[in-house]
Image (tube, grey):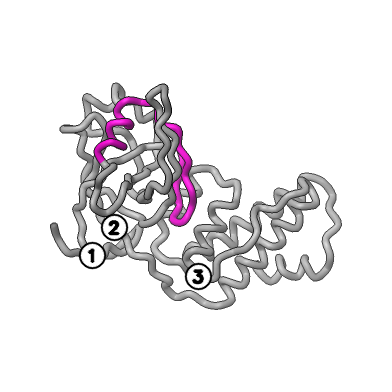
Amino acid sequence: MLQSTRSGSGGTTVGVVAEVIPLFPLSHVLLPGMPLPLHVFEERYQNLLTDIAEAVGGARFGVVALRSGTEARTEWARDDGPDVEAIGTLAEILELEPRDDGTSDLLSVGSRRFRIAELLTEGKPYLRAAVEFLDERDGPLRGDQVTRARDLLGLYDAILVRLAGRATGSELPDDASALSYQIAARLPLPPGERQELLVLDTTAERLQRLSALLRREIALLRGTRSIAVSPAVLRIASAAN
C-alpha cells in the first residue's frame, strides 16, 4: 500500500490508497451521510455480502454510478469493465436481513468518497476496484455561503409545503460539509447533477453550486402555480443572486 497526498479535480487523496474494495454499480448516486437501502437478489452480490461479512473494518462496499447501460456482467465480461463514474462513495452496512428465498435486504450509509484507480474484473463474480480515498476539505468557505444555502433551502421548503403539504426534511446538520451533502440529497436532482456535486473538491464549491441549483428549483416551483410569498422571503432569494 502507498501513501498519497495528490490533489486535483475530484478531491485530494489522503492516507492509504490503492485499497481494493468490492463495487456495486447503480443508476443511483450515493452521497456521504445518506442512507442506501438495497434488496439484493443476484447471486454475485450475495457472494459479495458473504465475502465482506467478516471484514476487519466492517462490512462495506463501494457504490459507483453507471454512466450508461446496466451492471449486468454479460455486458462487461469482454472489455475493461462497465461504464462507471470515477468517483464513488463507500457504503457501510448498518443492517442485513437474509430472506428465506435467498435474497437479502440491507441498509447502508454513505461514508467516504473515493476515486477509482483501477477496475478489477477478474477473480470474483462481482466488480472490484483499487481505490484512493478522498479528503473532505472546506476550501475558501465563508459563513455567508452556509447561511445562504440554509435560507434558500428554507424558502424551497416553504414553497413545497404550500404546493404539496410537505417539506424535504427537518433539522439540518451544523457541519458545513455534512450540510452540503444533506441539501444535495434533498433536492430532486438527476443523477448527473448529483454526481457533479459529489465530485467537487471542496465544501465551498459544493455550497456555491447548490445555491445556484436551489434558485433554479425555487423558480421551477414558483412556475408550477401562482404562490403568494411574503416580501421577507423574496428578499432571501434576491440576496442569494
Q: Is residue 234 above or below residue 33?
A: below
* Crowd band around label 2 with a 10 angstrom C-alpha radius: few (<14), some (14–19), many (20+): many
Mark identifier at residue 15: 1
From the viewer's perspective, is 199 left or right of 231?
left
Q: Is residue 228 magenta?
A: no
> Cα distance, mark 1 to mark 3?
22 Å
The location of residue 11, given as percent across then percent down, is 34, 61
Q: Residue at x 52, y 62 (%)?
A: 180
From mark 2 to mark 1, how far is it between C-alphas?
8 Å
Task: For the residues labelled 2 and 1, say whether their Cβ atoms are less than 8 Å apart.
Answer: yes
Residue assigned mark 3: 175
Residue that numbered label 2 is attached to: 133
Element assignment for label 2: strand
Q: Which secondary structure, mark 3?
A: loop
Amino acid type shown at disc 2: Phe
What residue do we see at 35% from left, 50% from top? 90
Are the residues flagged by discs 1 and 3 in contact, CB closer than 8 Å?
A: no
What's the CA distance linking mark 3 and mark 2? 20 Å
Mark 1 / mark 3, whichever is N-terminal: 1
Horizontal side of 51 relative to 147 (left or right) equals left
Q: Residue at x 66, y 63 (%)?
A: 152
Please tell me how many numbered marks the rendered image carries. 3
Range of magenta residues: 27-51
Under circle 1, the secondary element is strand
Considering depth in this image, is 135 or 68 the residue closer to the camera?
135
- Residue 204 in picture, x, y percent from top left: 48, 69
Q: Amino acid at mark 1?
A: Gly
